[in-house]
Amino acid sequence: MTSRRDFLIGAGCVAAAGTAWSRTPRNRVNLLGNHKLDALIPDQLGNWKHVPSDAIVTPQSEDSLASKLYSQSVGRLYEDTDGNAVMMLIAYGDTQSDQLQLHRPEICYPAFGFNVVRSAPASLSIQPGVVIPGRTLTAESTMRTERIAYWTRIGEFLPQSGTEQRTVKFENALSGIIPDGVLVRISNLAPDDAAGLALNERFAAALLRGIVPIGRPALIGTRLSRVIAA
């Protein structure tokens, strides 16, 4: 015979299960759709041209974690008509959750033998009145020093730090949303941070103007996409 105490405990468990189910993310946000990143990004971006290279630090890891984190990635070296070169990496994950989250470059680079000597939030200027919240890094190895600018998008948010990224993840979970996410990283070997940032910003502007418009929200979200000049 079921006692009143057992009934109350059982009812409490059912209520808790119902609450957990109601808070389980179920609605997906996918700003890339069925498109392929590689096809959306032209080999020619303004006066920048894609040239073959194997010098780009990628998010691959020995335990194949990257294959779980990222469903697509594009890594290219671009040179402009003045001989300047930038390395571009775009890594896209169709699911951002407790188990699967974008790896930020300040974590990725040390795994490849680099020492991150500077890391700071930055507002990357794309065109008058349009900035992207991102970050700049300086990473050194025995072979080279990279000046890095990057941003991340999770759903419609552009978190500038790991703390903001975790907050966005939590807010999405409470809203029942499973967002996609992207890391856009641009780097070069300029002699100082100021020159490196200027070069990275110039390429970022060319990238966002040059990408096929339907793919622009996948990089920066829908709101900023509406104000980027073609």
Image (cartoon, rainbow, N blue to C red):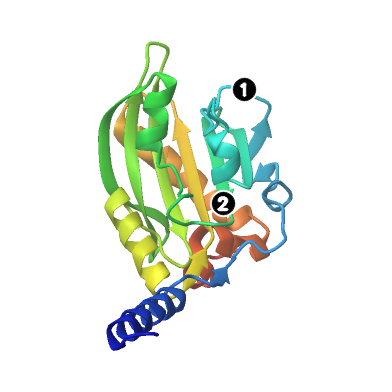
Within-10-Å neighbours for mark 1: few <14, some 14–19, many 20+: few
Frontmost residue, 62 versus 110: 62
Amino acid type, residue under disc 2 in the picture? Gly
32 relative to 55, above or below: below
Amino acid type, residue under disc 1 in the picture? Asp
User: Looking at the image, which residue is at 37% across and 39% down?
Assistant: 197
Residue 1 falls left or right of residue 66 = left
Can residue 21 be seen in this snapshot?
yes
Q: Secondary structure at mark 2?
A: strand
- Per the model, the C-alpha gap separating discs 1 and 2 is 22 Å
Question: Outermost residue toward the bottom?
Answer: 4
User: Looking at the image, which residue is at 40% across and 37% down?
Assistant: 105
Q: Quadrant of the N terminus?
A: bottom left
Number of numbered tags placed on the structure image: 2
Which residue is under mark 1? 54
Q: Secondary structure at mark 1?
A: loop
User: Looking at the image, which residue is at 39% across and 79% down?
Assistant: 19
> Disc 1 vs disc 2: which is toward the camera?
2
Frontmost residue, 208 versus 171: 171
Q: Residue 41 location in percent, x, y?
A: 67, 49
Within-10-Å neighbours for mark 2: few <14, some 14–19, many 20+: many
Q: Quadrant of the C terminus?
A: bottom right
Frontmost residue, 26 versus 66: 26
Q: Residue 135 location in percent, x, y?
A: 34, 46
Q: Residue 117 location in percent, x, y?
A: 26, 27
Question: Outermost residue toward the top?
Answer: 142
Which residue is under mark 2? 93
Who comes first in sequence, dot 1 or dot 2? 1
Frontmost residue, 36 versus 77: 36
Q: Residue 207 location in percent, x, y?
A: 57, 50
